[in-house]
Amino acid sequence: MPIENNLDKIVHRINAMVQDRQKTLQKRDFGIFGVSVVTVLYDSESGMFALEINQEKRKRFAFDDVDLLAIDVYEALSEFKETF
C-alpha cells in the first residue's frame, strides 16, 4: 500500500477527532496486526494533541499540527511493523 494512502487514512482519523464536538477529550488507538501501537489524545478546549507510544510507557509528546502528528503515528506504525 502506498505511503500516501496510509498517511491519508491517519490524517482522516485525526481530523475526525477535531470535527467531533461531542467530547472534550478524545482518544484514538492506532495499531497494526491487532496490536495498539500508539494512542492519540485530543483536547478540544486547548486544540492540542498528545501522542502516547504504547510500547514505551510514560512517553507522551504534545502536538498542535495534524500533519506532524500523522507523520509520527505513521513512523511508529512502520517501526513496529519492521519488528515482525
Image (spheres, rainbow, N blue to C red):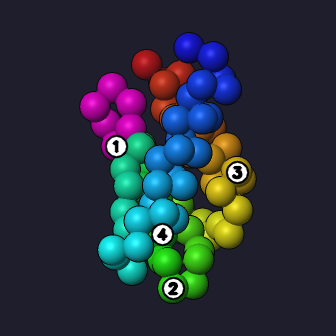
Q: Which residues are magenta?
A: 31-36
Q: Quadrant of the N terminus?
A: top right
Identity of the residue drawn at 53% across and 44% down = 12
Measure how far apart labels 3 and 1 are at the Cα level.
21 Å
Work out whether mark 1 precedes mark 4 in sequence or the reverse, and give the earlier one. Answer: 1
To which quarter of the image does residue 49 belong? bottom right
Residue 46 part of the magenta segment? no
Identity of the residue drawn at 67% across and 26% down = 4
Residue 8 is at least partly visible in this image: yes
Q: How many marks?
A: 4
| Badge 3 density bin: few <14, some 14–19, many ≥20, Cα 10 Å | some
To which quarter of the image does residue 64 belong? bottom right
Work out whether mark 1 precedes mark 2 in sequence or the reverse, and give the earlier one. Answer: 1
Residue 52 is at least partly visible in this image: no
Q: Which residue is mark 1?
A: 36
Identity of the residue drawn at 65% across and 23% down = 3
Contact (Cβ within 8 Å) of mark 1 with mark 4 = no
- Amino acid beneath label 3: Asp
Work out whether mark 3 precedes mark 4 in sequence or the reverse, and give the earlier one. Answer: 4
Measure how far apart labels 2 and 4 are at the Cα level.
9 Å
Determine whether the residue tagged by mark 2 lies in a helix, strand or loop.
loop
| Badge 1 density bin: few <14, some 14–19, many ≥20, Cα 10 Å | some
Q: Which mark is residue 42?
A: 4
Q: Main secondary structure of the magenta part?
A: strand
Relative to 84, 64 lies left or right: right
Q: Which residue is mark 2?
A: 45
Q: Work out whether 67 lies above or below 75.
A: below
Q: Which residue is mark 3?
A: 67
Relative to 35, 67 lies left or right: right
| Badge 2 density bin: few <14, some 14–19, many ≥20, Cα 10 Å | few
